[in-house]
Image (tube, helix red, strand yellow):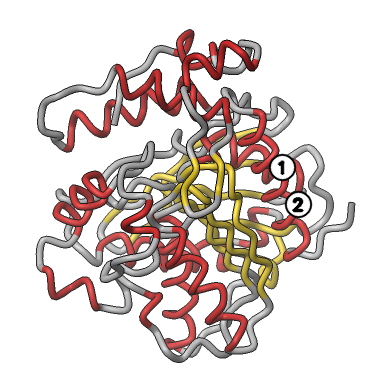
Amino acid sequence: MVNIARTTARTTSRLPKRLLRRIAGAPLVIDGNTLDLQMQAFATLAMKRAGDGPPTVDTVRAAFREMVAATQHNPVASVATHDRTIPGPAGELGVRIYHPATATGAAPAIVWYHQGGFVIGDLDSDHALCTTLADRCGAVVVSVDYRLAPEHPFPAWIDDGVAAHQWVVDQAEGLGVDPARVAVAGTSAGGMLSAVVCQEARHRGVPQPAAQILVYPGIDQTASGGSRDSCAETFPLSATTLAFFLHQSLPDPGAASDLRASPGLATELWGLAPAVVVTAGFDPLRDEGDRYAAALDAAGVAVIHRTERALTHSFTVFGGISRAARDGVDRLADDVATVLGVDD
């Protein structure tokens, strides 16, 4: 992770192409994909500010928090939010609830799990994105501050994710939502957690969520080759960062093959919730997300699948510095509205 000031980040959204190209250098092309110019210029500036010391949990958490604050798009002002706690499997869980002005009647709901490799991230990480989804879908979004490693070992976040989804279903009337239209969703690690919640629901014999929205998900902790190699040095998620997250969240290498850590290894996918799977061209996790979308489709699960070929991992937090990233957020919101059956 890197430390970067908001003023520096916003520079890439204002400069003309000729100056952006001077900053970025030659176009970056990987696996036939060409990186968005604003993203490439920002990545170049950001990496020049990268620290040389070994990462620690505290420094990576702080750097990610600073980057998100500097780069995400503006939240939708008409979406009301409030923070509270809910009962969790090991104590109280923090949540942030988003109520859109566009909600009518019993609204759909989205249980949201943030990104961060199960090591970093918090309720602010996907804040702007959650306001966009709430507004576009007329949905109540419940963002979950699940427990993180290394303080809380695997499978703590799985237990929290399952419990939070069940709480929203159980409290649907009080939240003003339709219990039959409660989806699970998330970015990166949160996307993986959403996939696990669906698989766990089938194992427990309880109804599936209304949908699973998996945004650049890390779906297979055992994956190697392909985009794991070709995108090993991409910003903001590199092979080194992936290894750091894996060491912190799954110190026991044998746990990587547990389906709760690698739901992409599951072979029985029939009957799972309809899915939106969005991957990114410049992301080590791209191939495993694409494979999971294909496997869901082959199992008869309805899937909306798209690769944002000009964008990077975590593109949803870069809408404030890249027009292409903001467009990607809007396409994602439209996909979620479609899978939830929301009329335009």
- Left or right, 258 with respect to 161, comes to left
What's the amino acid at mark 1?
Answer: Asp
State the image coordinates of residue 13 (x, y, percent, origin top left): 61, 17
Secondary structure type for disc 2: helix
State the image coordinates of residue 1 (x, y, percent, origin top left): 29, 31
Mark drawn on residue 222: none
Q: Are marks 1 and 2 in contact (CB under 8 Å)?
A: yes
Q: Closer to the camera, 269 or 163?
A: 269
Residue that lies at the very extreme toward the top in this rendered image: 7
Q: Closer to the camera, 301 or 182?
A: 301
Residue that lies at the very extreme toward the right in this rendered image: 344
* Location of residue 153 by image quarter: bottom left
> Rounded to the nearest whole Å, what is the CA distance between mark 1 and mark 2?
6 Å
Classify 10 Å Cα crowding around label 2: few (below 14), some (14-19), many (20 and above).
some
What's the amino acid at mark 2?
Answer: Asp
Residue 264's place in the image compared with 22, above or below, is below
At a point 50% along the width and 39% down the height, the residue shown is: 126
Residue 133's place in the image compared with 88, above or below, is above
Q: Mark 2 points at which residue?
A: 334
At a point 49% along the width and 68% down the height, the residue shown is: 166
- Left or right, 17 with respect to 72, comes to right
- Left or right, 161 with respect to 127, comes to left
Mark drawn on residue 330: 1
Secondary structure type for disc 1: helix
At a point 68% along the width and 78% down the height, the residue shown is: 302
Classify 10 Å Cα crowding around label 1: few (below 14), some (14-19), many (20 and above).
some
Q: Closer to the camera, 273 or 276?
A: 276
* Location of residue 306 by image quarter: bottom right
State the image coordinates of residue 65 (x, y, percent, origin top left): 36, 28
